[in-house]
Image: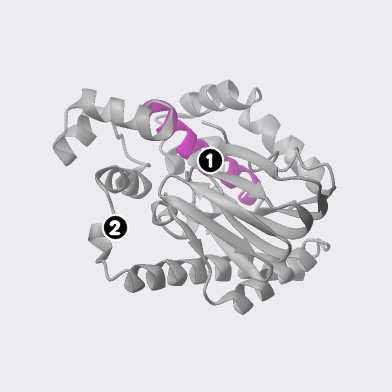
Amino acid sequence: MRMLYDSEYEKLTNEVFRKNDVNNFCLLTEGKGENIKESIIDAHWHEWLELIYVIEGGMQLEYPSGTMQVNAGEVALIGVQTLHKIVGSPGKFSFICLHVNFGLIIQYLNPSLFVDQTIKIQKTANFIMLIERVNQLLNSNDAVSTIRLKSSILEILANSIEELELTQLETNNQTEDLIDEFSKIIFYIGEYYRENITLGHLSEKFGYTAQYLSALFKKRTGINFHTYLTGFRLEKVKFLLLNSDKTLLEIAIDSGFSSEHSLINNFKKVFEMTPTEYRSVMKEKKA
């Protein structure tokens, strides 16, 4: 698994600017320059929802089900856990890339709605307006700007769901037909991650053997079921650490960990610091 939302554009040798949201709602990257030849960002995926607004030039997105050319004035949506490769066209380019925090998404909806989704936005003007507003609001850190920033991002999420529905209608498919067996399982995890979900539970629920599901997770995500579920829960933990005053025990319960001890151990294993240390470090940056 390659979760590259914070290093995705490091290979670009031109001017690339990142705006880190101190509230951890999003990450915004602005790029501008000139490619002497094709600029390639290798195939990868990440947990955060990605929106790319091409201002000048063009790029091609490559993903398992096809390719998509995104030109100046267009916006593309790349869903969570969506494998994709980005090929920037030769010549001058300018873009804004917005990543929306997975932890914020799961506060309001099931993130599985965005799994394996790559579409070109149809109502472009509205998205461009919202992305530019987010870009502007990230320059301020007062209470009013923070509220407006969160509101704008939530509006982007709502509009993204509407765009996915439009795409489904145009292909004349029913929603159920668009969800494969693995997506149904991922959707279920998104709904019930707070509960004691095991491979045995999933195998009974969906009618597959635990061995089959284990192999399916490895094939589709590159990691095993336990690592996926733990990572899902930890994204919720990170968001709650930064956006609530809840105790570690309360956060453990809200995110599906069996105990505060389990939460601390898993967090430290992945992020090499305790949840308390993480909260302290991030609050210092925010101050």
Query: Which quarter of the picture shows residue 186?
Result: top left
Q: Can you give x and y, in whole percent of width and height, for residue 69 in the image?
A: 57, 59
| Secondary structure state at the residue bearing disc 1 | loop
* Image position of 167 (left or right of 135): left
Q: Residue at x 68, y 34 (%)?
A: 278
Residue 44 visible, this orientation: yes
Q: CA distance from mark 1 to mark 2?
A: 20 Å
Amino acid at pointer 2: Leu
The foreground one among 276 and 193 is: 193
Q: Can you give x and y, in whole percent of width and height, for residue 272 in the image?
A: 65, 22
The foreground one among 286 and 231 is: 231
Read off the residue under disc 2.
178
Read off the residue under disc 1.
45
The residue stretch that appears in magenta: 226-244
| Label 1 crowd bin: few (<14), some (14–19), many (20+), radius 10 Å | many
Give the answer, above or below, for where 121 lies relative to 52.
Answer: below
Give the answer, above or below, for where 256 lies relative to 116.
Answer: above
